[in-house]
Amino acid sequence: MFSIFRRTAVEVAESSLKALNMDGLRGWQREMPMAALNSQKDLTQWVVGSDKDIGGFSEAHLEITPEGTGRFHGNISLDLPTNPEIKQSGYAAIRTKQKEQSLFGIPCWDTTLFRYLALRVKGDKRKYFVNIQTDGIVKTDLFQHRLFLRTPGQWETVMIPFKDFILTNNGMIQEEQIEMFREKVRTVGISLMDRQEGPFSIEIDWIKAMNTEFTEGDMDRVPDKVEQL
């Protein structure tokens, strides 16, 4: 109980500081850091999963490289578990840990002031997805988008419009699509479910909510006019 009150006190202090700084009125922001993988401390804020959790045979690991970035790697196996109720296997995923609850609920990211989810990654040629979990009614809902890599084997910044994410549940695209609850983003992550056996490896530096100089959330931002001298 004491830890809940302590977390609540921290949340109140942060909210008060934002109010004093008129955080809600400062307007345009270029970016908002959401997650990073640059240290062992960062590593503790992530969860790793795979079909091994339900008796499958895939391997998935997350570690910090000597260069100071995260590496999500392992091996995908399509072999089915002994449980006859499991009809499909062969996946691996990582996501940020959900923040601990306070008296005000579970702290979330408010991404409404940003148009893009940006990821600094270096991947292979496998088919990865980016996952967003919100504080919605159905806890198993995920908003997903393909992580398109233009230069496998090289670092690149991938920017995905929040509005392009698709609602899924248990890996299935939902017939009735609803708008993402962007005021309350709980977790972000990356998954691999391309149904291909073999090794995989993708490095992650950071994940941010981001604008460009021409965007302000979902609205286009008109650049200030430069006066002619």
Image (cartoon, rainbow, N blue to C red):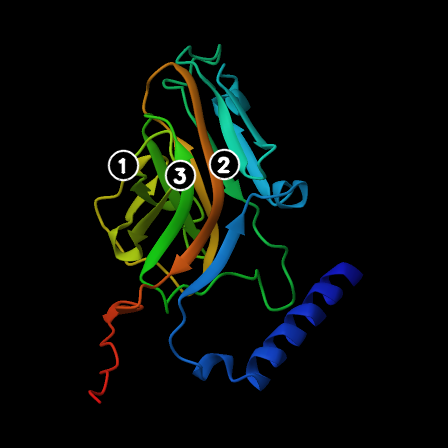
Classify residue 106 as left or right of residue 87: right
**In the rendering, at what x and y percent does residue 11 appear?**
64, 69
**Disc sitting over residue 155 in the figure:** 3
Please tell me which residue is depicted at 40% across the width and 63% down the height of the picture: 111
**Mark 2 or 3, which is nearer the eye?**
3
Within 10 Å of disc 3 (Cα), the crowding (few <14, some 14-19, many 20+) is: some
194 up-or-down from 10: above or below: above
**In the rendering, at what x and y percent does residue 18 appear?**
56, 78
Q: Does residue 221 appear in this view? A: yes
Q: Does residue 1 appear in this view? A: no
* Gap between marks 2 and 1 measured at Cα: 22 Å
Q: Give the mark nearest the N terminus, 2 or 3.
A: 2
Q: Give the mark nearest the N terminus, 2 or 1.
A: 2
Q: Which residue lies most toward the front here? A: 229
**In the rendering, at what x and y percent does residue 75 appear?**
46, 17
**In the rendering, at what x and y percent does residue 228 appear?**
20, 87
On-image quarter of the C terminus:
bottom left
Classify residue 85 as left or right of residue 42: left
1 up-or-down from 204: above or below: below
Residue nearer the viewer, 128 or 39:
39
On-image quarter of the N terminus:
bottom right
Within 10 Å of disc 2 (Cα), the crowding (few <14, some 14-19, many 20+) is: many
Mark 2: which amino acid? Answer: Ile
* Gap between marks 2 and 3 measured at Cα: 19 Å
Q: Which residue is mark 1?
A: 150
Q: Which residue is mark 2?
A: 94
